[in-house]
Amino acid sequence: MSTRSTSPDGGAMFAVCCCLHLPQLFSTCVAFSLVADMGFWRGAIGNWSMSLWCVCFAMTLLISIVELCRADSEFPFFWCNISVTYACYAALICLAASIIYSITYVQFVPYGPYRDRAIAATAFSCIASVLYVIEVAGMRAWYGIKEIFFYKNTISALLKVLETFVAGVIFAFLSNTSLYLHQPALEWCVAVYSICFILAAVVLLLGLAEWKYMLSRTFSIFQLVLSLLSVLLSISALVLWPLYQFSEEFGGQPQRSSDGDCRDELTHDMCAWDQRLAVAVLTAINLLVYVADLGYWAHQVSVGTEDQPRVS
């Protein structure tokens, strides 16, 4: 049975907007306003973090308007799935911005008003992340749904969100094309990241469209095959990327000090060696997520049962 018609009443929706959406809007707005006011001190990392907070603010505002106007029933996709998916991404985005901004920039800013603003922006970003997590946890109660896509298969759905999010962070580091251009092995790694991201995004969209309930058994097998493919591709990237980036035998730089762009003083950006290391670590993290996803769907196929969603 589809849960498309299930939706919280106007009073509950208004309460959610007041208790969560407004604080989310305030936190993200304060975060990017503080960084924007730092002028040239904000640096490239500050610009990157500020853009993430702006996106979260804009999307939260749009979702709040749609829900307050009760226009969510007009959307072709299951609205609560869309809302909870966005909240998951927003929580991860704000958390990632808080961590990256603090460890790659804030600690290097000299003591003074600029450092205070950077610390305050990080704090508000953390608050926003917590608020989005609370929204994800409370979505089930607000919509009165016992089992929906993200709660029937919470592990699988969150793994897909993690896969696409980590891939997105990798792409941010790969915007520095000098890390891999004109090196076939590294270009293959970039192709792997792109393919795995597309596969995960397609499955996530199919889940949002509730196709998994139309072809339950077939969808499980489809997920299993894609997960296996992603694991195999990621293994190749995990081997080739560190090998060609950090092994002198293959033209890499094993030591951070060997990269002339890396300095101890504030540079407003991550040097190339740090970006290479970040991609290697994120590749390993995503491989673990793909393996967990593969294990989940292998179990689903072996069991051979997937219940239909029920409205409580």
Image (cartoon, rainbow, N blue to C red):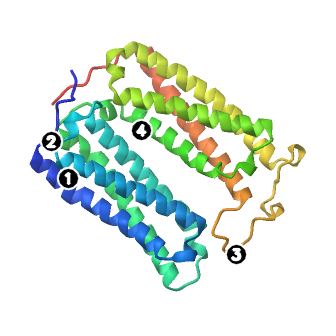
Instruction: Give the foreground label among 4 and 3.
Output: 3
Which badge, 2 or 3, comes first in the chain's sequence? 2
Which badge, 3 or 1, comes first in the chain's sequence? 1
Q: Give 295 or 163, whichever is nearer the viewer.
A: 163
Which badge, 2 or 1, comes first in the chain's sequence? 2
Question: Real-space Cα distance between discs 4 and 3?
Answer: 38 Å
Does dot 2 land on a helix, a strand or a loop?
Answer: loop
Q: In the rendered view, would you say 311 is above or below 193? A: above
> The disc labelled 4 sits on which kind of residue?
Leu
Q: In the rendered view, would you say 284 is above or below 2? A: below
Question: Real-space Cα distance between discs 2 and 3?
Answer: 52 Å
Label 2–label 1 contact, CB within 8 A: yes
Question: Real-space Cα distance between discs 4 and 1?
Answer: 22 Å
| Residue where numbered disc 2 is placed | 8
Question: Real-space Cα distance between discs 2 and 1?
Answer: 10 Å
> The disc labelled 2 sits on which kind of residue?
Pro
| Residue where numbered disc 4 is placed | 158
Residue 298 visible in image: no
Q: Residues within 10 Å of mark 4 (few under 14, many from 20)?
A: some
Q: Residues within 10 Å of mark 3 (few under 14, many from 20)?
A: few
> The disc labelled 3 sits on which kind of residue?
Glu
Instruction: Give the foreground label among 4 and 2.
Output: 2
The N terminus sits in image quarter:
top left
| Residue where numbered disc 1 is placed | 16
| Residue where numbered disc 3 is placed | 265
> Can you give x and y, in whole percent of width and height, for residue 49 in the image?
50, 61
Question: Real-space Cα distance between discs 4 and 2?
Answer: 23 Å
